[in-house]
Image (cartoon, rainbow, N blue to C red):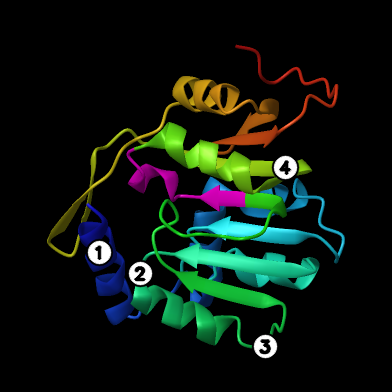
């Protein structure tokens, strides 16, 4: 499956598909999965360490890297990471890693871990969230955007790539099973957004009860 995902995103990179340089209408369209509210929920203060799972070409990273002390981005597609390196070269606090998030040995923990439009490629949802938890500082937060679309394939340019749709119920269960607390859950037009933490900090939310 990893080879299929790598091939899909390398193909997009070869076609110069780079959301960082999309015209404003397309950028606004992509924001329907995350957007400015998603970034604001990270509470970045110029000092925090941040990990993005599925950094892509840097669509979100170009907005978050200037706001944190250290930014690490992980992506499985070598050609996509090359584009991200070009898009983020001006930020000296950025480290980009090419590899499978589930297999990478990351030797540090982070204040913020986030991911958007990536977990659909991960079959082992519980394993992925367990790994996030192992990399998250005790007072840190995890932000996850999951696509509302329940298709099991991505069709693009005559190519078909298998994906594994997420549901709010299953995602909430995985977060709970990883011994994290859902602090908040809200919706955008195309996604469900989860904000989790390792500890129950007593934050009340009226938007999410399971």
| Disc nearer the start of the sequence (4/3) | 3
For label 3, the SS is loop
Q: Is residue 173 visible?
A: yes
* First-in-chain label (2 vs 3): 2
| Place of residue 8 in the rendered image (x, y in percent of width and height, measured from the top left) | 25, 64
Does residue 209 belong to the magenta stretch?
Answer: no
- What residue is disc 2 on? 77
Residue depicted at 41% across the width and 55% down the height? 103
Residue 38 position, x and y percent, is 67, 48
Q: Relative to residue 127, is residue 96 depicted above or below? A: below
Name the disc covering residue 141, or none.
Answer: 4
- Tell me the residue that label 1 is attached to: 8
Quadrant into which the C terminus falls: top right
Closer to the chain start, of discs 1 and 3, is 1
Looking at the image, is mark 4 or mark 2 earlier in the sequence?
A: 2
Which mark is drawn over residue 90?
3
Would you call the spot at circle 3 few (<14 residues within 10 Å), some (14-19), or many (20 or more)? few
């Amino acid at each position: 499956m990893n080879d299929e995902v790598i091939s899909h995103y390398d193909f997009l990179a070869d076609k110069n598909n780079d959301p960082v340089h999309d015209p404003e209408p397309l950028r606004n369209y992509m924001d329907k999965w995350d957007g400015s509210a998603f970034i604001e929920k990270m509470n970045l203060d110029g000092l925090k360490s941040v990990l993005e799972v599925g950094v892509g070409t840097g669509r979100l990273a170009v907005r978050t890297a200037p706001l944190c002390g250290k930014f690490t981005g992980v992506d499985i597609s070598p050609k996509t990471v090359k584009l991200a390196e070009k898009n983020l070269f001006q930020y000296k606090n950025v480290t980009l890693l090419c590899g499978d998030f589930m297999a990478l040995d990351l030797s540090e923990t982070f204040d913020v871990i986030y991911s958007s439009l990536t977990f659909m490629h991960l079959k082992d949802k519980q394993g992925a969230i367990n790994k996030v938890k192992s990399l998250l500082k005790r007072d840190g937060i995890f932000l996850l955007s999951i696509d509302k679309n329940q298709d099991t394939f991505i069709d693009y340019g005559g190519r078909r790539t298998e994906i594994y749709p997420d549901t709010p119920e299953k995602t909430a269960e995985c977060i709970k099973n990883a011994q994290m607390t859902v602090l908040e859950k809200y919706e955008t037009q195309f996604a469900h957004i989860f904000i989790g933490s390792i500890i129950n900090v007593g934050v009340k939310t009226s938007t999410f009860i399971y």
